[in-house]
Amino acid sequence: MSLGKILVASGVLQEKDVNKALARQKQEGGLFGANLIALGLITPEQLETALHGFPTAPKGTEDTGVSINILLRLMLKVIYVGAYETPAEIADEMMLPYPIVATLLEEADDRRLVEILGALDKSVHSQFRYALTAKGREWAIEALEQSQYAGPAPVSLDSYIEQIERQKITNERISKEKINSGFEGLVVPESFLDELGPAINSGRALLLYGSPGNGKSSIAEGVGKVFEDVIYIPYCLELEGQIIKIFDPTIHRRVSTENGLKSSALFAQENQELDQRWVPCRRPVVITGGELNLEMLDLKYDPHSKFYVAPLHVKAIGGIFIIDDFGRQIVSPKDLLNRWIIPLEKRIDYLTLRTGKTFSIPFDELVIFSTNMRPEDLMDPAFLRRIPYKLEIGSPTLDDYRTIFERVCEAQALELTEEMIEFVLEELHAHLEVPVARYQPKFIVDQVVLSCRYEGIPPALSRERIDAAWQNLYVRHTDPNVTYVTQAGGDNSMGPRLLGSEAHASAGGEVGAALVQLLESVVHGERDPNKKSNGSSDEHRGEAEDTHTAHDGPPDPRTA
């Protein structure tokens, strides 16, 4: 990617400024940055600041940080697997400057590993075409048996650590304006955003907790949107001959470029200062939930491809790592937190190769724990102390609830009358003593829209459809002898109360009393501690759940 494109992505230049500088460079020559300064489009200080984070392209094989033998074997694999013939093709695949690939081909020719087939065409500047010799094919096959990786050249561990320090997450200041802009689409109290701002700027650990369905996941994901810096992620790194893949296109958001860019190996003078082994990206946002286990925090070695893949938290370096539904992972919270005591406190992590080699890398990322459970039930005081910011996300105010409902209806082209919103607030929430939550409006509206689609009529709110949607928020029980009611005052934090029509009225014996006590303990969440819960939360999809109720979910308060 060109320097100009990165400066545009960073907000330093506009596209028209890049075109002006390129036009001048074509006429006057010189470096792209020098032409920017000559046109007054950027100051030397701005250019120096921008270039400070750029990994500069290596001038020779010794500048790559990787031994020439490793690069040579990688080149042979690339030629063998990709059937490449020209130095330009090889350079584009290995993401190395053309002169370095030319040096590697010369070395391979000296060792009788490649042979020249002839010129690509009859032009003066035509490239030679190369092919592997029998000996070269043997080397390539042997190299593939040791590792099947054949792609962009790796960077060294030292270079990776140096780049992490250059682009630390705390280098980017997140202002109040950025916070407000990033959360513009969410209905979040300004007081909460004022607490969130310092936590984001700390670049350390943040705990978001509170009742389910109030947007903890949305807020955690929104944090990633407030960052604007371009950082650089290596395709892979090399350590003691082993390859560790870092760049993940499913996680790392490559800074987009327009089509039609020329080859970075031979042309585009503006590219000459950038090391193409690094991918310009936005700060990554990695989200994991109940599937997280301790093995996912270690290097993953594939015995078939014979190279490593970096764990999730390493892919999140320089960005945000979100542990959603904390406390519901396969691994216990205690074991997970013990694994991260040193990374969170010392800002450094240790990884181990299968050979036993252990190495350290900076743990530079904002870690966000999001949970519906009580923090004191998940962490002891010592670990809570290691999380400097703990923010509770409570239920919305009635005004905020109205605003959420209005925005959801507007998105679905539904008319929200005062009658309908009053019906929801008074009949459903106030009368049934059910607390409001941020997910409820979207859940209700989605149900209404689908109901109207089934009926083949235009979407429209009505008491009947809202009432039907409301009932789908809860599990209904048909046993006439069992009735569920919520706690008085609408506080559902301790779970619903169970009333047995015969248990409380005529349970005169010890068996009846024991049965009532057992049923109430189940509903209040006092289950066998050895039995695992399979519950999960997802505020985005509006799933209604109560983490303190029995296995089959929260009851319908309308049956009270």
Image (cartoon, rainbow, N blue to C red):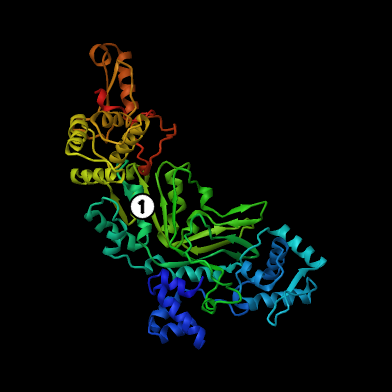
Callout 1, which amino acid? Ala
* Residue 474 location (% of width, % of height): 32, 29
Residue pictured at 33% horizontal, 47% vertical: 216
Front residue of 541/510: it is 541
Looking at the image, residue 281 lies above or below residue 120: above
Secondary structure of the residue carrying numbered label 1: helix
Measured along the vertical axis of the image, is residue 452 above or below residue 240? above
Residue 227 x %, y %: 37, 63
Q: Quadrant of residue 110?
A: bottom right
In the depicted view, which residue is nearer to us: 462 or 200? Answer: 462
Instruction: Answer with left or right where residue 349 lies relative to residue 191.
Output: right
| Residue 191 vertical position relative to residue 174 in the rendered view, above or below | above
Question: Is the C terminus in the top left, top right, bottom left or bottom right quadrant?
Answer: top left
Dot 1 corresponds to which residue? Answer: 220
Residue 399, image x, y percentages: 18, 45
* Residue at 58% from the left image edge and 77% from the top image edge: 267
Q: Residue furthest right?
A: 134
**Can residue 294 be seen by looking at this rendering?**
yes
Q: Nearer the viewer, residue 479 or 520?
A: 479
- Residue at the limit of the structure toward the front, as seen here: 457
Q: Residue at x 33, y 36 (%)?
A: 449
